[in-house]
Each structure stands twice: as C-alpha cells, then as structure tokens.
Amino acid sequence: MPAARPTPPRGAAYWWCFAVILLASAVSTFGAVTRVIDGGLEDANALFLASRAVAILVVALIVPLFPADGALLALAVVTVIVQGIDVFVFAVQEDWGLAAGAAVFCLVSIVTASFLARTDRVRGGA
C-alpha cells in the first residue's frame, strides 16, 4: 500500500483570500452591530444584517481549521454574493459610501478567490 502524499502547505493565495474575507466580514459585522446599537432591537433590518454578518464572520474565523481549501473558496463565493446584493441595496437607498465600500470588497474578494481557485490545492493537483 503506497504511502499517502503529504498535503502541501497553503500558499499565499489562500492567506490573501482569507485576509480579505476576514476583513470584509469584520467590517460588515462592525457596521451591523453599530446599526443595531443606533436603531435598537426594534430595527428588524439591522438585526437581519447583524445576524448574517456575525454568521459569516464566525465561519471566516474557523475556515482555516478545515483541511480543504475549497471551504474558503465556498465562503468567498457566499461573501461575494452577499456583497453584491449589499451594493444593490445600498445603491437603491442612495447610500453611496456604503455601496462603494461593498463594491470594493466584492471586487477584491472576486480577485483573491480567483487566485485561490487556480491553485493546485483547490484543483486537486500537487
């Protein structure tokens, strides 16, 4: 029985993607908690925003514990979708500062996730 090949260490693409997703989710969580504090528990939209943001942040914090890099890639896809929807919602509300911030995080997340998706660890090589 042949010995199993050791898994190569995670490369820079993984850690850049992780840093971007973690930063985006932390900023989103901070903004959501701030809205809950300002609006109180009666602001249902702020509570929904906070629940989503906290959930993504928790998963972002534990995703390095999973052996497969695809877990981070899946989280990056979810984050890009959420940020894209946020851009639309903030634009409809004419909150251009938040729309621009979400758009920047969305684009940077797409770029880093694309680099991660091209690595051998995700594609099954190496």
Image (spheres, rainbow, N blue to C red):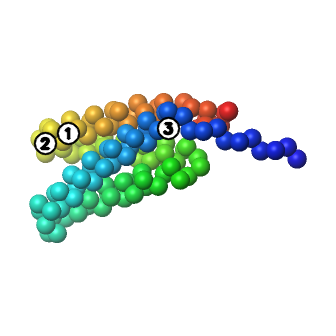
Which residue occupies 32% across, 44% down? Answer: 24
Q: Are marks 1 and 2 in contact (CB under 8 Å)?
A: yes
Q: Is residue 81 visible?
A: no
Which residue occupies 30% across, 41% down? Answer: 84
Q: CA distance from mark 1 to mark 2?
A: 6 Å
The residue to which callout 3 is attached is 14
The residue to which callout 2 is attached is 95
Disc on the earlier residue, 3 or 1: 3
Q: CA distance from mark 3 to mark 1?
A: 26 Å
**SS under mark 3:** helix
Is residue 64 or residue 86 the one in the foreground? 64
**SS under mark 1:** helix
**SS under mark 2:** loop
- Residue 107 in percent (x, y) is at 33, 32
Disc on the earlier residue, 2 or 3: 3
Q: Assess disc 1: are there few (<14), some (14-19) or many (≥20) residues with their C-alpha within 10 Å of its C-alpha.
A: many
Which residue occupies 37% across, 58% down? Answer: 55
- Disc 2 marks a residue whose amino acid type is Asp
Q: Is residue 8 left or right of residue 49?
A: right
The residue to which callout 1 is attached is 99
Q: Which numbered mark, 2 or 3, is in the foreground of this view?
A: 3
Check the picture and name the quadrant holding the C terminus: top right
Q: Are marks 3 and 1 in contact (CB under 8 Å)?
A: no
Q: Assess disc 3: are there few (<14), some (14-19) or many (≥20) residues with their C-alpha within 10 Å of its C-alpha.
A: many
- Disc 3 marks a residue whose amino acid type is Tyr
* 61 over 41 or under it: above or below: above
Is residue 26 or residue 82 the one in the foreground? 26
User: In the figure, residue 69 lies in which quadrant?
Assistant: top right
Q: CA distance from mark 2 to mark 3?
A: 32 Å
